Image: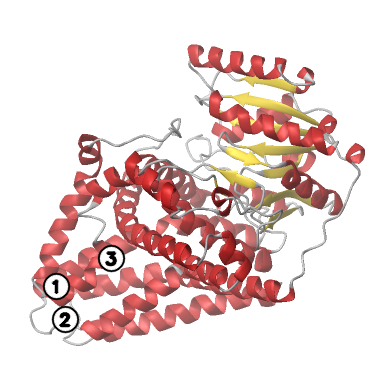
Amino acid sequence: MAARRLLVVFVVLAVTLLLGSLMHAVLAPGGWTIAKILMMGSFLGAIPWVGFCLANGAIGFVLIMARDWRGVDPPSPSVPPDRLPRTAIAITVRNEDMGTVLPPLRRLLNELDESGAGERFALFVLSDTADPALASAEEQAVAAFRAADRDPARVRYRRRGSNDGFKAGNIMDFLEHHADGFDFMLVLDADSQMTAAAVLRLMRIMIDNPRLAVVQHLTVGVPATSAFPRLFQYGMRAGMRTWATALAWWQGDESCYWGHNAVVRIAPFRTHCQLPLLPGGRHILSHDQIEAAMLAGAGWGVRLIPLEDGSAEANPPALPEFVRREMRWLAGNLEYRHLLSMPGLRPMGRWQLIQAILLFGCAPFYLIFMLAAASAAVTDTTSPFPARSALAVILVWAGALYAPKLLGYVEILASARKRARYGGVARILSGALLEAMFALLIDPITVVSKTATTIRLALGIRAGWAPQNRGDRGIPWSEAFRLFWPQTLLGLGLFACFAAAGPVAVLWATPLLGGLPLAIPFCVLTADPRVGAWMQRHGIAAFPEELGALSPRLPR
């Protein structure tokens, strides 16, 4: 495992050296100004995450292709249903529409019954809903669900009066007061969907490895109708397939934990995952990575299974919901800086916290780089814009940053079976092209939002964990303008600066900043039901599940 981890470090360092050298070659001619120094410094600050993306994408791609060439599936240990440990299905809800939460649970229970394992499971709906009216509706919905079940006693509803400790507090309260008699816990979010086959696979892996505390699936997006989640999760699915395969290879049983769609061994989790308070007595917003680090530090394993069949979740239906989710995650992940020196963690556990911080912490570097570049475009009149070398930097940078999803598309196209399941070459390429445009537009928009949130957090303005809207909706132009006028004005101003350096500079900046002046129409169009309906009708950015080509096991 040490050699594998050294390979990742080598790739990151190599990318840092290559991109740093290329950027130096771009900026050095004409001498160093304050703007150029800021560009160089912020670029170097952002490169390590880019190198990490390339390392995971390339390693995952090689592993997937090798496995496909061999044509060998991993062994699946078999355990008779009546010998499965007692398992609590724990789903956390807060102000959720139970009409969308409960049907996937019904399907899961029915499938478990059909497998003969249903008697080993009980369902717990763990509510943190504070509003009495909403809580009453929740309870009534669960009561009707319970009454329709073949074994009503296995369906239970528990509501806390507050949201203390957020989701982690909800789970730990359940474990301390309601989990007696259960060995395992299947953790689900309100938008989670899992098949019985996937759940039983995870349980059998856990049984076969008694030192595992958490085992989880790669989770994909639920087929969506709205254009925004269709495009977002099309790229996410391609990228996460290579990414998760690499993580499983070099992290082993010290993997990350995503907090849902996972089977947890209750005893070690209850013992070792009592989360510390942050400075000032605040509860931790984002719990999953520190829980994984604490378990690994105590000698327990956390394993990621890079199979994508049978485990899914819904993604935000539109740009405003997506940005709000990203800001919640950013606030939670940046809190990990307080825990890096926490005693009892292993080096990989500390890296997991650093990785979570880097996921969002690089955003200010990107924005500083573009602001400094725009300043240089206006003020540097002594040297022409270095078009060729600047283009080389951007191509290498983009290729490394988006390597996981780009290579994910390549591995689909390389397999006749996978191509057929995704609807053929033309459909795959059209989806990949639209998703690439989508990514280039959304990334600068979210960089501005992430930077603004980071500044607010640095000023002591604390973030909350508000309930989420999960339903499709159109976005009126007035709402889009209210939310994204800062990005629009910033984008127009930056492009005006680059225009001072000539049309080549504008072309260079367009892939990096094009989403800013287009933020408002981008928000409206990607939420427009007509756009989503058109994409669905033509099968654009469609998953195999939607195309009706789902086989018993998706390719890895």
Q: Marks 2/3: CA distance?
A: 16 Å
Q: Position of residue 450 (x, y in %)?
A: 35, 50
Instruction: Classify the position of the C terminus by image quarter.
Output: bottom right
Q: Position of residue 80 (x, y in %)?
A: 91, 43
Amino acid type, label 1: Ala
Task: Please rate how many residues cluster around mark 3, counting C-alpha atoms within 10 Å: few if below 14, some from 14 to 19, many from 20.
Answer: some
545 and 58: which one is in front?
545
Q: Which residue is mark 1?
A: 377
In the image, is 534 to the left or to the right of 148? left
Res. 494 image quadrant:
bottom left
Q: Marks 2/1: CA distance?
A: 8 Å
Q: Is residue 268 above or below residue 123?
A: below
In the image, is 34 to the left or to the right of 363? left
Mark 2–mark 1 CB contact (< 8 Å): yes
Chosen colour scheme: secondary structure
Name the N-terminal-most of marks 2 and 3.
2
Kindly identify the residue that appears in the image at 66 percent across and 64 percent down: 251
Q: Which residue is mark 2?
A: 385
Q: Is residue 242 visible?
A: no
Q: Position of residue 393 (x, y in %)?
A: 33, 79
Kindly identify the residue that appears in the image at 53 percent across and 39 percent down: 284
